[in-house]
Amino acid sequence: MPRESRVRPLRPEDLPAYLALRLALWPEGGDDLKEVESLLQDPDQAAFGAEVEGQLVGFVEASLRPYAEGCDTRPVGYLEGWYVAPEWRGQGIGRALAEAAEAWARARGCREMASDAELSNLVGQEVHRRLGYQEVERIVCFRKDL
C-alpha cells in the first residue's frame, strides 16, 4: 500500500532535495541555484513539492504565460517542469502535483493550463493524456551556430 504523500509549496529548506530532483529531470542544468531562487520569488511562477515521510519525492513548477499553443485565453497556466522520482511513480503523486499547479493557476484567473513533453518522452505524453490534457501540436526545433 502506498504511503501518504503531501503536496505543498516549496520552502527554502527544500533547496538541496529540490535541486537534486530538478537535476534528475534536467541533467544539463537543473541545479541552477540562481534560476531556482528567482523562480521562488516571482509571483508569476510557483513550485510545489510532494513529500512522503519528510522526504521530497517530486515537484512541479508552474508559471503564467501570455500565450501557449492551442490555448484561447490569457494568461495561461503552464506546467514548466514536473517530476516524480522513479520509485514513487504510479501512486498518484504526479497527479496531485499537477492538480496543485492547476489550482494555483485557476486562483490567478487562468481558464486553461498547458504543458509540453519531448517527442521521445512517451510516458510523459501518456501521463498528460490521463490527466485530461489534449495534444494540440507537434513541433521540431532547430538551431544553428553563428
Image (cartoon, rainbow, N blue to C red):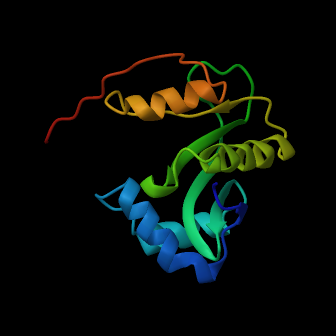
Image position, residue 23 (x, y; %): 37, 63
41 to 28, vertically: above or below: below
**Which one is in front, 39 or 91?**
91
Image position, residue 32 (x, y; %): 40, 69
Residue 85: tell me if it is visible.
no
Image position, residue 35 (x, y; %): 48, 66
Residue at image coords 72%, 65%: 9
**Which one is in front, 67 or 45?**
45
Rendered image quadrant of residue 121: top left
Image position, residue 144 (x, y; %): 16, 35
Residue at image coords 86%, 46%: 107
- Please identify the quadrant where the N terminus is shown: bottom right
- Please identify the quadrant where the C terminus is shown: top left
Residue at the far left: name it: 145
140 relative position to 145: left or right:
right
70 relative position to 144: left or right:
right
Rendered image quadrant of residue 56: bottom right
Residue at the far bottom: name it: 13
105 relative position to 125: left or right:
right
Total marks in image? 0
Residue at image coords 42%, 70%: 20
Residue 136: tell me if it is visible.
yes
